[in-house]
């Protein structure tokens, strides 16, 4: 079973008062960056305001592009992923009572994605960091960053009632949308773009077999639905819901009935139900902060951008940031070249906006918009159906979707 048992996480490694890179945030982006830097011989300290158990308990995405797979291999943590992850060669789009398969591998020269939960990625990275005794502080309170416009940046935090400070060369802000790093940048120096969608996703985790071998994205007059999975015995399903809905309004029975009503007849007949392990409602938004570098401070992952989950880009986009940033730091320490760090923001944002566009496209294509929002009503639904009908019968259309879904090439 994929979801690892949550065990207490302790860090007894002494925390230095000076290091090369301080990483704020111990989600997958921060952990992956720390692992890549450590393997390159670059000292780093990781600070996280939450406990390790809290971080590990977050239920998030589970579709990995090749870039993420390659980086986990490069970081030396891919063994369990390859053993337990599910390789997918395509996805299915459902509309008008039928399903249509997009053969991503055939359209992209053999590229695939892998279903492997973010919880498992986090566990693998945590285990590797702990085994290597890399300095990590969980439950670091009141984290503050200082002098990031100078060549002597510092990060301070409180642990067990004692205030600490770490001097460093660089600060990597991997602390998420609500983190301190982006919030520390003066408003006049950062431009923030945001679109909040007028609906959310109600997600359920349950130990039942998947409906199909690949993900099903469903456009239905009642609203969007997604049948996904975490393993061959555990599913993660979603239905579009109102932002006014509350989790307690949705019994398991109501969820399963609603999901079944939004699927094609074959998928509805194959759907197996069971008690929920976890149930939550997530709002959808598109968000980008630019630039992504401020002197010695670099933003990565959700600290810099949020995408709607429809395109399966959130974790993968964070991994792409880490790829660019880790290589920039490695180049700096190996060659004393600033080229990579000076170009980090431009290269990262170029990829970010392409992922935002694709996620916006998938969200607009598959969801029912409430009256007065976007292309709502019968006309909007018919426009979506026409686009979907063209898409699944056009090699060019399917190729464009497949290329974006498996991950666009890097600028190197």
Image: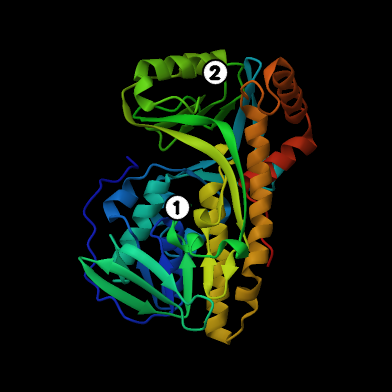
Q: Is residue 71 visible?
A: yes
Q: Is residue 107 above or below residue 192?
A: above
The residue located at (64%, 47%) in the rendering is 356
Residue 408, labelled with which disc?
Answer: none
Q: Is residue 402 above or below residue 288?
A: above
Name the spot of residue 337 as percent of width and height, x first: 61, 84
Q: Nearer the viewer, mark 2 or mark 1?
A: 1
Name the spot of residue 126 as percent of width and height, x first: 33, 59
Circle 1 SS class: loop
The residue located at (37%, 20%) in the rendering is 249
Which image quadrant for residue 134? bottom left
In the picture provided, is 45 more to the left or to the right than 8?
A: right
In the picture provided, is 178 more to the left or to the right than 162?
A: right
**Mark 1 highlights which residue?**
178
Residue 263, labelled with which disc?
Answer: 2
The quadrant of the image that shows the N terminus is top left
Q: Counting residues from the N terminus, which is met first, the one under dot 2 or under dot 1?
A: 1
Report the front residue among 301 and 113.
Answer: 301
Which image quadrant for residue 5? top left
Name the spot of residue 62 as percent of width and height, x first: 47, 43
The residue located at (53%, 65%) in the rendering is 185
């Amino acid at each position: 079973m994929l979801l690892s048992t949550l065990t207490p996480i302790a860090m007894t490694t002494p925390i230095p008062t000076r290091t090369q890179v301080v990483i704020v945030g111990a989600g997958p982006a921060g952990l992956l960056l720390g692992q890549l830097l450590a393997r390159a011989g670059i000292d780093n300290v990781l600070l996280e305001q939450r406990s390790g158990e809290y971080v590990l308990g977050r239920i998030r995405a589970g579709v990995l592009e090749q870039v993420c797979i390659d980086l986990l291999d490069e970081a030396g943590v891919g063994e369990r992923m390859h053993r337990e992850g599910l390789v997918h060669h395509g996805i299915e789009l459902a509309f008008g009572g039928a399903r249509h398969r997009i053969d991503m591998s055939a359209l992209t020269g053999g590229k695939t994605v892998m279903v492997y939960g973010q919880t498992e990625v986090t566990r693998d990275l945590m285990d590797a960091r702990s085994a290597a005794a890399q300095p990590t502080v969980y439950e670091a309170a009141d984290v503050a960053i200082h002098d990031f416009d100078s060549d002597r940046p510092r990060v301070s935090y409180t642990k067990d009632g004692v205030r600490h400070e770490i001097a460093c060369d660089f600060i990597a802000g991997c602390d998420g949308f609500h983190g301190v790093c982006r919030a520390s940048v003066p408003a006049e120096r950062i431009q923030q773009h945001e679109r909040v969608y007028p609906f959310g996703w109600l997600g359920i985790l349950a130990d039942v077999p998947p409906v199909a071998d690949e993900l099903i994205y469903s456009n239905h007059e009642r609203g969007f639905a997604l049948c996904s999975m975490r393993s061959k015995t555990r599913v993660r399903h979603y239905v579009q819901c109102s932002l006014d809905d509350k989790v307690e309004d949705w019994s398991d029975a109501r969820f399963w009935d609603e999901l079944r009503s939004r699927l094609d007849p074959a998928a509805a007949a194959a759907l197996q139900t069971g008690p929920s392990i976890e149930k939550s409602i997530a709002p959808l938004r598109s968000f980008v902060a630019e630039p992504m570098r401020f002197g010695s401070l670099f933003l990565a992952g959700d600290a810099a951008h949020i995408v709607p989950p429809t395109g399966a880009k959130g974790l993968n986009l964070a991994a792409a940031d880490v790829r660019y940033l880790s290589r920039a730091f490695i180049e700096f320490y190996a060659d004393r070249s600033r080229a990579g760090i000076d170009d980090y923001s431009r290269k990262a944002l170029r990829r970010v906006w392409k992922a935002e566009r694709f996620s916006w496209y998938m969200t607009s294509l598959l969801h029912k918009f409430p009256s007065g929002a976007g292309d709502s009503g019968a006309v909007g639904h018919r426009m979506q159906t026409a686009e979907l009908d063209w898409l699944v019968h056009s090699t060019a259309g399917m190729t464009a979707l497949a290329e974006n879904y498996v991950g666009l090439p890097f600028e190197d």
